[in-house]
Image (cartoon, grey):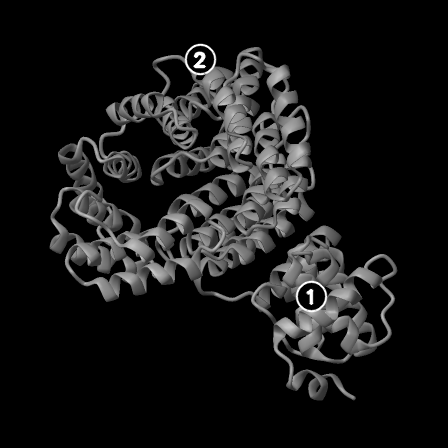
């Protein structure tokens, strides 16, 4: 029976169930009997989030059906997604021979040609690059570098000048690098200045390159001023402390970036732009290409860890953070983020062990304790979370700008553990620094309403939150609930119905609506809502007990 006929009557969920046994039994040997079995196993691996297994199984399927262009394209994308660029490049070449291209296969051909120093292959890859959107910007930069490497600096600048508007800082940065490589010192410095001033923010890449340029000219003091400017704008950035010391001591300056580094920088910047468009998979693909070109670039590994975390590929995220060199300025932050990724990947004990190791390494830093607190909170280990947050607060001190966020987290845990007086104090202190934060306003306002205290103040906080998030179902629920507590039942019904329309599967909101219906005499509708709560939250013992009591006895006048 062929795969298409076999699969026609099955849902994807059923296919996954059938294939899971294949994954479990064949993952170690990767020797499947049929193309259809390998393909099904690849889908099951993707469903489980094991993208490495998906790439392996697709590769097996392709061995059995080597001329299938769709399968070649899928296998190519799978290889790119896990950073196996050598294998992806071979597949991209097969696609090119078939006159087929994916969105990113020309990029793969380009970096492969660059690594091989194959000028003809590079020209071919450049001819295949598109011209639209962020990848079109990358194509412009790549073509300019190709011209510059060929000795035609004037042509390189013409290519950059002809680019579409909106990318001036990035293009000025590459004009500066090209000028530096070509020995055009005056033009390079002008372009560096434009790159530093044109954007809304000063980038690390431009600061690094311009500073190195100044150091190579023997202008160490100017370079140090540049590095300090970046550190002033980004006070928590780990970069450039060593660079300042090196520049002032006339130490050995960094090497001049070449085309490989420039293309990796461009890929990383385009990845940032794609992230802004919520295209995390494409951003990851570009970062994997950049890491293949520059495997020692810790900034790329760090960015890759962040993107993988956003994509919920947590084990891979932890591995990416782990590739940051121990002596890198990014190493500390990478290890902190690795704690979170390990925890999100289900490796909580490894996460806690790493967090505690970091706390021992820097006992004066609040960061490990904040991270440990978050991990403990995620596992409902409330007392340990409070202990960690308390220690972090002590280390931060009174003036830290990070204190309000930490107070909010501490207050939330204290509220769960029944330590309301301390929780309320933490929320109020946080509110002094963040008076317009809608989540804090709503949390404290709802907590007061739920406790049936400070109701006028609670209403004020919730209305302020709603001004900032007018379509948030949870905040609208808070408004309805405080109106209910104030005895304004008709108004409460209006708001709670709106909240349910926005959050139709949230049992607490539905329970609130049932209460409001009861108070307005709509008893049948109230019982309908309460019964719905039982279907949505059968495992919430406290809520189930309360709802069952209401279904039996309703609400009396004292229930408000």
Give the label on residue 394, or none: 2
Give the residue drawn at x 73%, y 83%: 3
Give the residue drawn at x 73%, y 62%: 55
Give the label on residue 44, or none: 1
Image location (x, y in percent) of residue 69 = 69, 78
Image location (x, y in percent) of residue 24 = 79, 60
Quadrant where the C terminus is found in the figure:
top left
Give the residue drawn at x 23%, y 38%: 449
Give the residue drawn at x 59%, y 44%: 304
Query: Is residue 303 rendered to the left or right of residue 15?
Result: left
What is the residue that sits farthest to the front in this orientation? 553
- Residue 318 vs 20, above or below: the answer is above
In contact (CB < 8 Å): disc 1 and disc 2? no
- Residue 57 vs 227, above or below: the answer is below
Query: Is residue 316 rendered to the left or right of residue 418?
Result: right
In this view of the protein, can residue 437 be seen by the observer? Answer: yes
Q: Earlier in the sequence, mark 1 or mark 2?
A: 1
The image quarter in which residue 181 lies: top right
Q: Secondary structure at mark 2?
A: helix
Image location (x, y in percent) of residue 168 = 38, 47
Q: Secondary structure at mark 1?
A: helix
> Within 10 angstroms of label 2, few (less than 14), some, or many (20 or more) residues?
few
Give the label on residue 228, or none: none
Marks 1 and 2 sit apart, C-alpha to C-alpha, by 48 Å
Instruction: Please name whichever residue, 546 or 32, is drawn nearer the observer in this view of the structure.
Output: 546
> Within 10 angstroms of label 1, few (less than 14), some, or many (20 or more) residues?
many
Image location (x, y in percent) of residue 558 = 19, 42
In this view of the protein, can residue 66 be seen by the observer? Answer: no
The image quarter in which residue 37 lies: bottom right
Instruction: Please name whichever residue, 12 or 76, is drawn nearer the observer in this view of the structure.
Output: 12
Quadrant where the N terminus is found in the figure:
bottom right
């Amino acid at each position: 029976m062929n795969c298409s006929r076999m699969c026609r009557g099955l849902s994807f969920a059923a296919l996954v169930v059938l294939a899971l046994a294949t994954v479990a039994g064949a993952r170690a040997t990767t020797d499947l009997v049929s193309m259809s079995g390998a393909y099904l196993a690849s889908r099951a691996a993707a469903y489980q989030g094991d993208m490495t297994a998906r790439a392996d199984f697709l590769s097996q399927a392709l061995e059995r059906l080597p001329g299938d262009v769709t399968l070649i394209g899928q296998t190519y994308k799978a290889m790119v997604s896990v950073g196996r660029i050598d294998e992806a490049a071979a597949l991209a070449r097969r696609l090119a021979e078939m006159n087929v291209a994916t969105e990113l296969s020309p990029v793969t051909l380009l970096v492969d040609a660059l690594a091989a120093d194959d000028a003809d292959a590079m020209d071919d890859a450049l001819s295949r690059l598109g011209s639209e959107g962020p990848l079109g910007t990358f194509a412009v930069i790549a073509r300019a570098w190709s011209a510059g490497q060929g000795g035609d600096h004037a042509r390189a600048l013409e290519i950059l000048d002809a680019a579409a508007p909106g990318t001036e800082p990035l293009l000025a940065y590459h004009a500066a690098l090209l000028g530096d490589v070509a020995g055009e010192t005056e033009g390079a410095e002008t372009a560096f200045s434009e790159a530093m001033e044109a954007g809304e923010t000063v980038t690390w890449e431009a600061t690094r390159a311009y500073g190195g340029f100044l150091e190579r000219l023997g202008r160490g003091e100017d370079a140090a001023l540049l590095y300090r400017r970046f550190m002033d704008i980004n006070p928590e950035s780990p970069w450039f402390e060593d660079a300042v010391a090196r520049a002032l001591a006339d130490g050995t300056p960094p090497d001049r970036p070449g085309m490989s580094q420039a293309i990796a920088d461009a890929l990383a910047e385009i990845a940032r732009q794609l992230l802004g468009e919520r295209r995390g998979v494409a951003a990851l693909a570009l970062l994997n290409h950049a890491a293949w070109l520059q495997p020692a670039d810790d900034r790329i590994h760090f960015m890759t860890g962040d993107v993988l975390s956003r994509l919920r590929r947590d084990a891979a995220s932890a591995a990416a953070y782990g590739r940051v060199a121990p002596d890198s300025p990014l190493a500390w932050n990478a290890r902190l983020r690795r704690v979170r990724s390990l925890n999100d990947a289900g490796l909580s004990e490894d996460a806690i062990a790493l967090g505690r190791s970091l706390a021992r390494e820097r006992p004066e830093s609040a960061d490990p304790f904040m991270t440990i607190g978050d991990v403990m909170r995620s596992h409902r280990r409330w007392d340990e979370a409070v202990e960690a947050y308390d220690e972090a607060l002590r280390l931060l001190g009174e003036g830290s700008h990070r204190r309000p966020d930490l107070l909010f987290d501490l207050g939330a845990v204290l509220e769960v553990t029944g330590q309301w007086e301390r929780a309320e104090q933490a929320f109020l202190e946080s509110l002094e620094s963040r008076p317009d934060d809608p989540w804090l306003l709503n949390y404290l306002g709802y907590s007061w309403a739920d406790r049936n205290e400070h109701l006028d103040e609670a209403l004020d906080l919730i209305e302020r939150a709603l001004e900032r998030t007018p379509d948030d179902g949870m905040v609208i629920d808070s408004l309805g609930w405080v109106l209910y507590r104030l005895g304004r039942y008709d108004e409460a019904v209006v708001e709670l119905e709106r909240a349910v329309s926005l959050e139709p599967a949230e049992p607490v909101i539905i329970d609130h609506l049932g209460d409001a219906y009861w108070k307005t005499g709509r008893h049948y509708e109230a019982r309908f809502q309460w019964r719905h709560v039982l279907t949505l939250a059968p495992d919430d013992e406290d809520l189930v007990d309360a709802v069952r009591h209401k279904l039996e006895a309703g609400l009396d006048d004292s229930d408000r």
